[in-house]
Amino acid sequence: MKDLHSIVSNFKIEGTLLEIKPLGAGLINDTYKVTTQEADKPNYVLQRINHAIFQDVEMLQANIDAVTTHIRKKLEEQQATDIDRKVLHFLPTAEGKTYWYDGESYWRVMTFIPNAKTYETVNPEFSYYAGVAFGNFQAMLADIPNELGETIPNFHNMEFRLQQLRDAVAANPAGRVDEVKEYLDELEKRAEEMCKAERLHREGKLPKRVCHCDTKVNNMMFDEQGNVLCVIDLDTVMPSFIFSDFGDFLRSAANTGLEDDPELSNVTFNMEIFKAFAKGYLESAKSFLLPIEIENLPYAAALFPYMQCVRFLTDYINGDTYYKIKYPEHNLVRTKAQFKLLQSVEEHTPDMKEFIASCL
């Protein structure tokens, strides 16, 4: 392993370095806690950026810098207390950049937020907090003056994902197309409806906004009293439709089964989670949302199981080249589970519409 002490020494930290230990169980970046000797100095978080996923580190860090600077300014205008725990702070190097390249890997250091924790719990209470927090995150960034880049191009672009599926079907590299015909037909039947966000955007009716694009309960920090301090894990923050943050959260949080549940009877769409998240989200986001964004929130709930179904099926047809699998049919099992979730979302669409109307 690289000498982590020498990497940290490139950043302008306060205090004397005591120790560096692995932190958390993130899937994308390697993360370490940096402890300093002095009680009155902050501790830090050191991260190695996953350069395979985030290929333009300059843009990635510029996005994060723009977002955290804007949120800090908003909190100062609101005369908020405890601002340093409510927005992430990245340290500069001597050159003034917020990352360090050691010739092989990219690193960054941020201030460790003390007396804060994350939760994995997904229940109505935490889903409501998540709705408020992510709605508030979007609301604070609704007037950001910076033009942000796409850290993962076409990440939530449904037209692009469908084209990937159609290309896979045409090539049929693993000879699996015949066995999944039924799912291909079902997905194509819904294709036009599911690509409506891109269409509405081209028609000038639907804006792109700054979104988090990885909305999960464990991407929020809570204080000792259980209040949300801030949204974390900002690597995927980029221009997208608000549907990204709304639909992506519900795809995992409101699924009563597992993402790859082989027992399809376990998989349904949990309306209690939907109601809690939607209520919190609309409370903090409706100040800036357009009517077309609000009326399409049920579409967002369907879009993400659909998109994930398309992505898993594409990978299955391609011979499992993208997602890690535990057994040969794994991507097909994932496809079926996501499709079952999609069907359950479709059944609940009238209830969702009714609930959203009641929140306004």
Image (cartoon, rainbow, N blue to C red):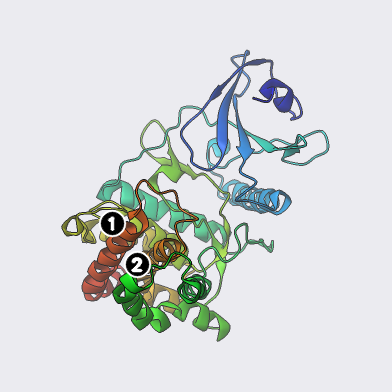
Q: Residue furthest left?
A: 265
Looking at the image, which residue is at 66% across and 61% down? 148
Judge whether 237 appears above or below 85 on screen: below
Label 2 packing within 10 angstroms: few (<14), some (14-19), many (20+):
many
Q: Position of residue 193 (x, y in %)?
A: 39, 82
**Mark nearer the N terminus (2 vs 1):** 1
- Give the residue at mark 1: 254
Judge whether 179 appears above or below 321 on screen: below
The disc placed on residue 301 is 2
Q: Secondary structure at mark 2?
A: helix
Q: Residue furthest front?
A: 175
Q: Is residue 104 visible?
A: yes
Q: Residue furthest bottom?
A: 203
Disc 2/disc 1 C-alpha distance (Å): 9 Å
Q: Position of residue 94 (x, y in %)?
A: 82, 33
Q: Amino acid at mark 1?
A: Ala
Q: Amino acid at mark 2?
A: Ala
Q: Quadrant of the C terminus?
A: bottom left
Give whichever of 2, 4 is nearer the camera.
2
The quadrant in which residue 95 appears is top right
The quadrant in which residue 354 appears is bottom left
Q: Position of residue 172 (x, y in %)?
A: 46, 71
Give whichever of 24, 172 is nearer the camera.
172
Q: Position of residue 117 (x, y in %)?
A: 42, 33
